[in-house]
Image: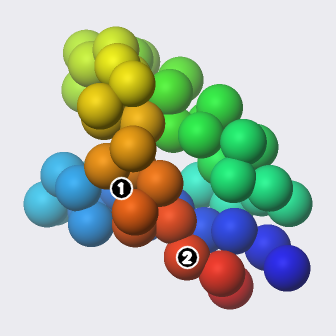
Amino acid sequence: MIKVLKCKDLMPGCDFIAKGETTQDVLQQAAIHAKEVHGIDLTPVLIEQVKLVIKDA
């Protein structure tokens, strides 16, 4: 099942959506997006928060 992360679930107003076969795929996309767009490095604490909003498509 495809995994989906909507950035707006964490950063209101952001329309970025990451999709992948696994949670790890989505986390990799999220890390790049967070750094490039929001200037945020994903720490272990943030990674756990991101995992909470990754849903099955």
Residue at 18% in and 52% down: 11
Residue at 75% in and 43% down: 25
Q: Is residue 33 visible?
A: no
The percent position of residue 45, horizontal first and vertical second, equals 29, 31
Q: Residue furthest bottom?
A: 57
Frontmost of labels 1 and 2 is 2
Looking at the rendered image, the quarter that the N terminus falls into is: bottom right
Residue at 59% in and 40% down: 27
Image check: 48 left or right of 22? left
- Name the residue beneath numbered marker 2: 55
The percent position of residue 34, horizontal first and vertical second, equals 37, 29
Please tell me whether mark 1 sits on a helix, a strand or a loop: helix
Q: Amino acid at mark 1?
A: Cys
Image check: 31 left or right of 47? right
Q: Residue furthest left?
A: 12
Image check: 52 left or right of 17? left
**Corner quadrant of residue 53:** bottom left
Assess disc 2: are there few (<14), some (14-19) or many (≥20) residues with their C-alpha within 10 Å of its C-alpha: some
Q: Nearer the viewer, residue 15 or 40?
A: 40
Mark 1 and mark 2 lie on one chain; the one further toward the N terminus is 1
Q: Which mark is residue 36?
A: none
The percent position of residue 47, horizontal first and vertical second, equals 42, 36
- Name the residue beneath numbered marker 1: 7
**Corner quadrant of residue 6:** bottom left
Q: Amino acid at mark 2?
A: Lys
Please tell me whether mark 2 sits on a helix, a strand or a loop: strand
Q: Is residue 53 above or below residue 45?
A: below
Pointer 1 with pointer 2, Cβ within 8 A = no
